[in-house]
């Protein structure tokens, strides 16, 4: 089952795709957001499908939006793959490295990514994204994290490395928060249908391979990440967690940074594919 939000920017409507057929979710909810997830929304969708209560619809040609509306937080984990830490010039961290992206960086999976006017070191990062479904605070164990995860989707944690590492001595969120810097989607897949530590993830630029790894290589697995985060902050339904990226980014020096007109393809087995074209943002 895949939860989708389709339609023009700001006018997305909720849908579910099951066995290749798309159904309208508006009889159940006006949107796929934190309130929907917290109210057992995924279970209610499954019940409605079993009871044949949803109308099948044709959605061809509709824009794909981010699969969760208005996340109140986008929490990110840095250097969560040992090879990526090494290519960044760092030792693997002993504890999860935490930073934040502004929630308004979230856009649809195929929307244009805007390069800031003066940016010269814009990078791609394929990541498994976790969407929270229940409030998580001071979870007693990693296993308890299973109960608060609604599902999984794909994130491209676009980064401007000079802003991240060079401006003011390095403040990560500076390089992460430009507009359009978090394409998300295409779909939210329920947590019980995904093994988060057995997913192949890949990225391409202009059709050329960049990253190819597995979430099995995470330093800190998903359940540990959610457990540890809950000790330091309260995770709310609809919040998004970017769980880190593997090696193969431009920061390594092996590949050029993104330029105006480049195309990124980001994919994770079982979760789908994103494709974004870059454009230079204009002042004013």
Image (cartoon, grey):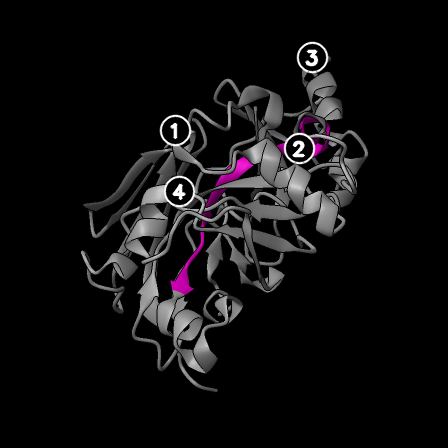
Percent coordinates x, y for residue 241 in the rendering: 58, 46
Distance (Cα) linking label 4 and label 3: 40 Å
**Residue on which the image places disc 2:** 150
Which disc is residue 81 wearing? Answer: 4
Q: Depth check: 3 or 240 in front?
A: 240
Distance (Cα) linking label 2 and label 1: 18 Å
Percent coordinates x, y for residue 133 in the rendering: 72, 36
Which disc is residue 131 wearing? Answer: none
Q: Residue at x 78, y 41 (%)?
A: 138
Residues at discs 3 and 1 in contact (Cβ within 8 Å): no
**Residue on which the image places disc 1:** 269
In-image side of 85 versus 32 (left or right)? left
Please tell me how crowded label 2 is: few (under 14), some (14-19), or many (20+) other residues with Cα within 10 Å.
Answer: many
Please report whichever mark, 4 or 3, sits nearer to the chain's N-terminal start: 3
Q: Residue at x 36, y 38 (%)?
A: 267
At numbered mark 2, what does the secondary structure look like: helix, strand or loop?
A: strand
Would residue 153 be counted in the magenta stretch? yes
**Residue on which the image places disc 3:** 50
Distance (Cα) linking label 4 and label 1: 18 Å
The magenta-colored residue range is: 145-159
At numbered mark 4, what does the secondary structure look like: helix, strand or loop?
A: loop
Q: Nearer the viewer, mark 4 or mark 3?
A: 4
| 65 vs 222: above or below | below
- The picture quadrant where one finds residue 82 is top left
Distance (Cα) linking label 3 and label 2: 20 Å
In-image side of 22 versus 228 (left or right)? left
């Amino acid at each position: 089952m895949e939860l989708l939000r389709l339609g023009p920017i700001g006018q997305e409507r909720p849908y579910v795709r099951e066995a290749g057929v798309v159904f309208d979710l508006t009889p159940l909810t006006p949107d796929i957001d934190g309130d929907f997830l917290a109210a057992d929304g995924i279970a209610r969708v499954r019940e409605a499908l079993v009871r044949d209560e949803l109308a099948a619809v044709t959605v061809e040609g509709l824009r794909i939006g981010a699969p969760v509306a208005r996340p109140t937080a986008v929490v990110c984990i840095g250097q969560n793959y040992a090879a990526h830490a090494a290519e960044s010039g760092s030792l693997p961290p002993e504890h999860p490295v935490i930073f934040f992206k502004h929630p308004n960086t979230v856009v649809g999976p195929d929307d244009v990514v805007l390069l800031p006017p003066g940016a010269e070191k814009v990078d791609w990062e394929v990541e498994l994204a976790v969407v929270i479904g229940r409030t998580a605070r001071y979870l007693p164990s990693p296993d308890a994290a299973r109960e608060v995860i609604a599902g999984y989707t794909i994130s491209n944690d676009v980064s401007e490395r000079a802003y991240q590492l060079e401006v003011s001595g390095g403040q990560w969120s500076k390089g992460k928060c430009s507009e359009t810097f978090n394409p998300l989607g295409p779909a939210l897949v329920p947590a019980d249908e995904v093994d988060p530590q057995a997913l192949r993830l890949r990225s391409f630029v202009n059709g050329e391979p960049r990253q190819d790894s597995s979430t099995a290589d995470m330093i800190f697995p998903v359940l540990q990440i959610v457990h540890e985060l809950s000790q330091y902050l309260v995770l709310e339904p609809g919040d998004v967690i970017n769980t880190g990226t593997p090696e193969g980014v431009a920061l390594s020096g092996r590949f050029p940074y993104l330029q105006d007109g480049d195309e990124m393809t980001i994919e994770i087995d079982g979760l789908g594919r994103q494709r974004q074209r870059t454009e230079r943002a204009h002042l004013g």
